[in-house]
Structure formats: C-alpha cells, structure tokens
Image (cartoon, helix red, strand yellow):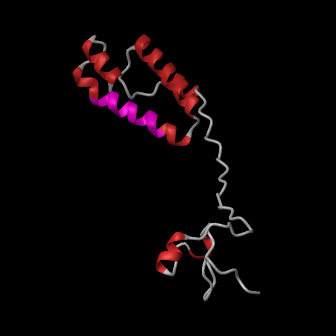
Amino acid sequence: MRLLNHLLSTGQIKRTDVEFYLAYTTKVFEFAENYEWNSVLNFDYSYRELQAEHAFRWGTFSPHMELQILPPKRPRTVTQHTPSYPSKQPREECRIFKAKGSCPFGPKCRYRHPEAGTTADQPKKH
C-alpha cells in the first residue's frame, strides 16, 4: 500500500489504474502461495522494471515474463513434537492432585500422584 501511495503521489500511476495495480499485487501474493518467495520477489522486480520501461497496464503479463521461472515451493518436512515425559516420576508431588484428589493431566502430569491410601508423609509400601 505504501508503494501504491508513492506511485499515486508521484504521478507514476493514474487513479484509473489502481484497480489493475491491486489485481497485479493480488496475483503476486497468489504466486507466493505456490512458489519460492525469493523467486516471487525476483519476478515482481523484473515485472516492475518492464512495466516502467514499456508502460503496459498493470496486471498485464508480458510475453517476456513467461520466461521467468518460478520454482515451486519445496515441501516442508513436518516433524511432530511429541512431548517426552521422564521415565522416573519426579520427587515433587502434584499440587492439583493433592488439593482435589484428581489431576486433569492424568498420567501425562509431570508431577507425582500419590497412590490411593498413601500420604506425602508416609512412604509407599511395596
């Protein structure tokens, strides 16, 4: 929008061409969904240079631009984060469990849940 404002204030674009400029900008961001961002920026830069040189209407795709290669985005490798819980229960007792007798985190809670019939003062019997 800053660039559009600059083009309007310097008279480099007519008010009647704003709709075409916005359509072009939309197309650039559509390219960004499918192509590598740096290649989209190079495309945009080349397009703007040609538009300034040849004064064609914004949004018109020149035959020269068809030669511009936009490589598709590389698929991102998605790594799922699975929380790792320590195999040994920590020494600290769960305050929620102690206060309410149950814990919303259940077995995934990082704190120790005393077994039924034991208290924090008494050691667990085996």
* x 62%, y 79%: residue: 114
Q: Answer with the quarter of the image where residue 91 lies.
A: bottom right
Query: Looking at the figure, which quarter contains the C terminus?
Result: bottom right
Q: Main secondary structure of the magenta part?
A: helix
Picture coordinates of residue 48 (x, y %)? 44, 19
Q: Residue furthest bottom?
A: 117
In the depicted view, which residue is nearer to us: 123 or 33? Answer: 123
* x 26%, y 17%: residue: 8
Q: Is residue 5 above or below residue 28?
A: above
Picture coordinates of residue 2 (x, y %)? 33, 22
Can the viewer see residue 57? yes
Q: Answer with the quarter of the image where residue 3 lies.
A: top left
* x 69%, y 70%: residue: 89
Picture coordinates of residue 112 (x, y %)? 63, 72
Query: Looking at the figure, which quarter contains the N terminus?
Result: top left
Q: Is residue 72 above or below residue 64?
A: below
Q: Residue furthest left?
A: 15
Q: Is residue 49 above or below residue 78?
A: above
Q: Answer with the quarter of the image where residue 80 lies.
A: bottom right
Q: Is residue 101 magenta?
A: no
* x 28%, y 20%: residue: 5
The magenta segment? 19-30
Can the viewer see residue 13? no
Drawn side of residue 30 relative to residue 108, left or right: left
Count the marks: how many? 0
Drawn side of residue 125 relative to residue 35, left or right: right
Picture coordinates of residue 26 (x, y %)? 39, 36
Q: Is residue 29 magenta?
A: yes
Q: Residue furthest right?
A: 126
Drawn side of residue 80 relative to residue 23, left or right: right
